[in-house]
Image (spheres, rainbow, N blue to C red):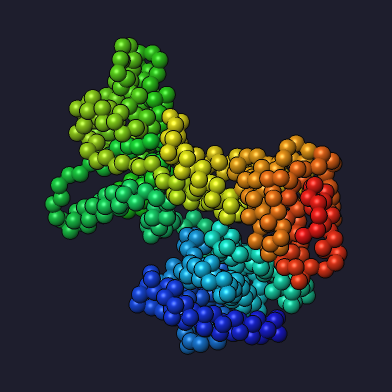
Amino acid sequence: MKEYLNAMLSAYREVHEAICGLCDKLDDAGMGTKRWIPEQSTREVQKLSFYAYFLFVARADGEIGEKETGIFNAVMDTGFSVKDLSLLAEKARVDRETYITELPLAFRASVNCDNRIKTAQGLSKTLYHAYAVLGLICMVSDEHATRSEYDRIIKYLEMIYAFLESNLDDTSEIRSPAETVSEYLAGLTGENGKTGIDAIEPDRDGVSKKEGSPQKDGEEETLEELLAELNGLIGLDEVKYDVLSLINLVRIRELREKMGLSMPPISLHLVFSGNPGTGKTTVARLLARIYHKIGILSEGQLVEVDRSGLVAGYVGQTALKVKDVLKEARGGVLFIDEAYSLTPQFAGNDYGPEAVDTLVKGMEDQRGDLIVIVAGYTERMKRFIAANPGLKSRFNKFIEFPDYTAEELTEIFKSFCRKNKYRVSRPALEYVREHFEKRIAEKPENFANAREARNLFEFAVSRQANRVIVDIDPTEDLLTLIRREDVMGRGITIGKEQFLAENALAALSEKRAGIPSELLKMKLDELELAPRSLYTLRGVMIRTVGDLLDFFEAGGMLRDLGNLSEKNEEEIYQGLESLGWTGRA
């Protein structure tokens, strides 16, 4: 393992030297991280990112030891002690679960540079490989490679890889984290005598297996983690400001009470107003946990109900039903969705008002260990609060949840993809953004904000499954890639119809593997597909030009005309002719 470590150290020094030079060039060109952090150079910002990443991997299997500290100092050219690194890890908060969602700032600069200056392409790839190598150096620094360390490396690289796939114009030479790490592990021989990834051993006894946090079982989340989760929500800037202001007010009230200072009474009950799918329930659930953490609530659970959970059909049953719900919510937050339905315009024999009266009394009885949040459409909520004097005196804080923008809905769609290990091609993302722009412009009655993004994601996953299932042996890239035709919900099948120019161009534009320009110049709108059976290339079923180009890209055989062997070239021509594409370019 020492020989492997020395080899990886040598590889890292080489790539790190290149990165330092490129960081300096970014600053010289005004394209570095100084746009965000003016007081530090890109090189300095990246150095701190490497520090934190090394410590993140090192803490996966327990505390940082002498050997890991020695390697850290050798790699980073520092002189830290074990205690110094432990304190640094605490300060960088690398143990929190949100750490693996925080992209190193240098990647935003490198992608911008690679996309704008084509001759400079490679900075993002070099940086990506540096993280892979550095992680493996840390993993073997104590001469004991463990599964928890390996998992942390892969998860962190997956976050970077997802960003590059979505934002970098040319990702043809950037492989998935599993493939990249597997290649670097080729020279590793473990204590068990096995090589490569098989050399990685299970975690030692006593080490937490909870990925993303080496905390002990049962340890509660911190206030900082909860606030980071709140700030990490997409959009909702005004909502975050209002919620954080409220939290600060509550914390100051607690401090004043401890010091014996008076504080005017404040109501913590809230009205969340806005259209469906704008994040009201998500924020309410977070707020319950935050209030529990700062000592306002004893439990911190969220109990979510609507009219059906509070109103019964017979006299006397409604009050009992409301009391049961209040008992369940005690110590936490009671979230009532579409609360205005409790006071219909034409009540008649409706028992909704009885539910409201019982609710108001229960809020008073459980004052101090219950917070009620009522939610619904803005104007209807205003009328609901005004309809009952008891509600009006207790609900004086309104937080408005605006509709999401097309850009925010696109980010939410991407977050669903990341969480479920899918990648999205750039043409697919462009279509998703256009789709949301159109939906927002039309704003139909059933427009559902974030649920629109979820519905589109689930639809795309279903379409992708139908597309990929015909492949005899689909690769990981094919299984994880969502293409434009998946989000559009339609593909072109041989023998069915002519290629529409839009679909053919979409299939071609997804490919960034150096397609010969002659192929792109063909008149796609005049191309007619031959009504014949499916064509097979090396066991892969080819139905569309998109499938054919996927095959070429996955095989890594299509770079430029000079790199094509005669056999590759012949296969390309055979495949194109099978789709009715005749002639030699």
| Residue 135 image offset from top left, x and y in percent | 59, 73
Residue found at x 21% / y 32%: 392
| Residue 246 image offset from top left, x and y in percent | 27, 49
Q: Report the quarter where the C terminus lies.
A: bottom right
Let me know if residue 66 appears in the view.
Answer: no
Look at the picture and state if 94 lies above or below 406: below
How many marks the image carries: the answer is 0
Relative placement, left or right, of 115 versus 554 is left
- In front: 448, or 406? 406
Let me know if residue 387 appears in the view.
Answer: yes
Residue found at x 28% / y 49%: 242
- In front: 256, or 514? 514
Relative placement, left or right, of 353 versus 213 is left
- In front: 339, or 86? 339
Q: Report the quarter where the N terminus lies.
A: bottom right
Residue found at x 31% / y 49%: 238
Relative placement, left or right, of 433 versus 236 is right
* Residue 328 figure quarter: top left
